[in-house]
Image (cartoon, rainbow, N blue to C red):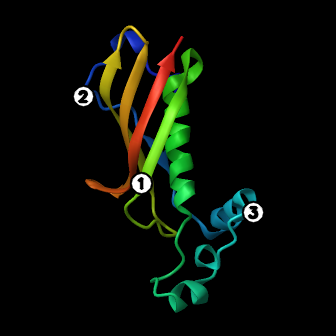
Amino acid sequence: MNGIDWTRAEIGQELEPLVKPAIEKVQLVKYAGASGDFNLIHTDVETAKHVGLPGIIAHGMLSMGFLGQLCGQLAGTNGFVSRLMVRFAGMVFPGDVLNCRAKVTNKNEEERTLDLEIYVECEPGKALTAGKATLKFY
C-alpha cells in the first residue's frame, strides 16, 4: 500500500482495509514483552478462565496498534498520522482474523487533512475496537 491519493479522497469513501492473519498465542507473548503488559489473561488459559473469561484474550492495545499500522500505510510517504484515538468494545481471541477498516468522514482542503472513522472487526458489522484518526498530508 503506497498511501491514499489525497486528491481523489472523498467523504464517505471506504479505504483499502488491512487484514491481519489469525492471532496466535506466540504473538501475544511477544506483544507482552514488547509492551510490558504481562497480565496473564493474555497468555495463560487457566488465569483467564479464573477471572471469568472464556480463554486468553489479545491485548486491546494490539488492536489499536493494527489501526495505527493501517493509518500509517494510508498516509504513506505523503503525510503522517496526526491523531489516533480508540475505544475497546469487544474481545479479540487467538484464532481471530482481524479486518482493520477506515472510512473518510471529513476532508479539509485548507489544512490538507482527512478525518477517518477506524475500526477492527472479526465479523462484518461488529467493531471490536473503534475510533477516529486524522491524516495530515504535505
Q: Is residue 49 left or right of residue 40?
A: left
Compute the Cα span from label 1 to label 2: 21 Å
Name which residue lies at 41% across and 49% down: 99
Q: Please state which of the two labelled residues, at mark 1 or mark 2, is closer to the viewer.
A: 1
Q: Nearer the viewer, residue 115 or 78?
A: 115
3D distance between C-alphas at marks 2 and 3: 38 Å
Give the residue drawn at x 63%, y 82%.
Answer: 44
From the top left corner, tell me how far across and down residue 37 is, in percent. Answer: 68, 66
Residue 7 percent across, percent down from the top left: 38, 9
Q: Quadrant of the C terminus?
A: top right
Query: In this rendering, is residue 29 above or below 43?
Result: above
Residue 26, above or below 134: below
The answer to whether mark 2 and mark 3 are in CB contact below 8 A is no
**Pointer 2: what residue?**
12
Q: Is residue 10 visible?
A: yes
Q: Residues within 10 Å of mark 2 (few under 14, many from 20)?
A: few
- Work out whether residue 5 can be spotted: no
Depth order, front residue of 18/86: 86
Residue 79 higher or lower than 86, as above or below = above
Give residue 35's position: percent from left, percent from top. 70, 58
Callout 1 crowding tier (Cα within 10 Å): few <14, some 14–19, many ≥20: some
Of helix, strand and loop, which one carries label 1? strand
Determine whether the residue tagged by mark 3 lies in a helix, strand or loop.
helix
Contact between labelled residues 3 and 1, with CB atoms less than 8 Å apart: no
Sequence-wise first label, 1 or 3: 3
Q: What's under tag 1, amino acid-wise? A: Arg
Residue under the point 33% across and 19% down:
107
Q: What amino acid is found at the position of numbered circle 3 in the picture?
A: Gly
Residue designated by label 1: 87
Instruction: Say which residue label 3 marks.
Output: 33
The one of 100 and 38 positioned closer to us in this rendering: 38
